[in-house]
Image (tube, rainbow, N blue to C red):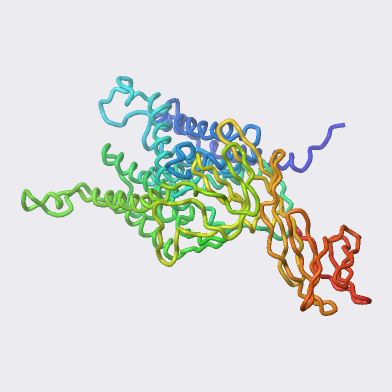
Amino acid sequence: MIAVPDAATLSRLAVALAVLAAAVAVVVLDRPRGRWGAQLRSRFVLGVPWGTLVSVGGVLAVYLFVQGGWHHWNAPVTIPFRAWSYFSPLGMVTAAFAHSGSGHLVGNLVGTLALAPLAEYAWGHFPRERGTQTFTSPLTNPYVRGFVAFPAAVLAVGLFTAVVAIGPVIGFSGVVFAFAGFALVRYPIATVIAIAVSDALRTLYGALRQPIVSASAGPSYSSPWWADIAIQGHAIGLLAGVLLGVWLARVRGDDRPSAVRVAVGVTLFGIAQSLWAVYWYRGSETYVLFRAGGLALVVALAVLVASTVAASDRPLMPVDDAVASLRSVPRWRVGATVLLLCTAAIGGPAVPVNLMTAAEGDLPGDGRPISVQGYEVTYAENVENGMVSVIDVEAFGETTSVNTSGVIVRNRDRGIWMTAVSKGRLAFTGSTTVRVGGVGWRESVRVQRQGWSAVGGGTAYRVRLSYGDQRVTAYTSPPARADPVVAGRNISLEATSDAFRVNVSTTNRSATVSVPERNQTVSVGGLEITNVEGSLYAIDGGTRVRVATTERYD
């Protein structure tokens, strides 16, 4: 008897057949007769964007073999590979090519496959100057240009975006935006279409990976979606790509698109890719979004890029005398200079910020930190961020000096000080794992929060860390008082390093006892405290009041 495939398999098969049928229909209707291949071969060796594929392979190799994604696809090591500071060269070199997880990686690789071929096509493996002999030098050799020169340019742009990005950034998206900026100069509308193609590819990948998704409503914990965007790194990459595209077009004398096409392309691209999401982090998991100002900046950028691309080589003003050197500058160079100044203005603040070191002295927290080969891990609340910048920056009521709460990781040798897991996220999940490591190694520190929530009051909790034979209670919260008053007595929950206690107090005296085990009862301060399946009840004669429950996690 032939087994019927399950629903997931049938769904994947349906998607594959639909894509195949669409491709066949397009070929039959359009009848290209080899035109597509000939067009690609006119710019690419054998019609293949080799530079794009080599770049994708390099980024994938970093994730698999440097970050440990080969054995831990969904849990790579990320902390040492972020752009922490100029005193952490490993992070600066790897940040643009490392990723925080498989979804982050796939998203950037799909964006690369959609946009990089456009940029590579605009440049071409074959030199465009008339009379150039292709195999006479490495600069004109199409194999060198495809397999070496383009990936080398990608490497250079990646290092540039890491050096001038306000850390600790991670990811290839800055380079992806550089591909887009380069392509927008030559093919603005095609670039916008490529963004739609990348979204389609992500949807196709998701449909094949999870053809059927079941979900239900429930609580969740997340920061605002725009707070996860490296907006400064994206802007730096886009401007770098635009400047390179303008320079190449002027050097080669390529035909340029109209100002309208460029302005529309840049505006649509900027909005679609959320370049308008300019935000600031205030600390304590609070963010500020400057939506209107960000959108105005996108429109202004579109006008500036369009005017630079479409501007002529004529002097800025008529030259009447020999000393009017400024007025003899070609008009397009004025726009290019403004773009360069914008790039410097956006990237410049990264210099003092990246001249950072991890604060010396003891880490905050109630206990000694967990130590793992140069890393220190602890937990603290409402403490000043320990990344010490050369210059504190304050503007528009915001400041770079902020407080933080959560799991803190420090490595003074690598210049690392970070809140690896926020207080809010740990309170939501109850436990987590912090991965530390370096090239070729990784270790995991377990973090667990336990607590009792007082009825109508706060929560008394403690945070414990464990690694190997190291066990540390890193933090104990202040007591939490329940709202109900039973027989004139206040009831509070207290967290200690080794237990939770119930405190029963009157005006002039108090008594404390450990929280009873499940389905057990203890007497304290004239009351009986019973634990019924994780809920604490205070009993006085015939009065029974719930005063606390174990903290729930998702």
Above or below: residue 454 compared with residue 105: below
406 sits left or right of 324 in the view: right
Which of the 4 image quarters holds residue 21?
A: top right
Viewer can see residue 304: yes
Q: Residue at (35%, 28%) from the top-left corner?
A: 126
x and y, in percent, of residue 103 in the image: 60, 44
The C terminus lies in quadrant: bottom right
x and y, in percent, of residue 259 in the image: 32, 53
35 and 370: which is toward the camera: 370
> Which residue is most to the front?
508
Viewer can see residue 111: no
x and y, in percent, of residue 501 in the image: 79, 62
Which of the 4 image quarters holds residue 240?
A: top left
x and y, in percent, of residue 139 in the image: 32, 26
The N terminus lies in quadrant: top right
Label total for image: 0
> Which residue is most to the right?
542
Q: Residue at (62%, 51%) from the top-left corner?
A: 407
539 sits left or right of 28 in the view: right
Above or below: residue 100 compared with residue 218: above
539 and 125: which is toward the camera: 539
416 sits left or right of 488 in the view: left
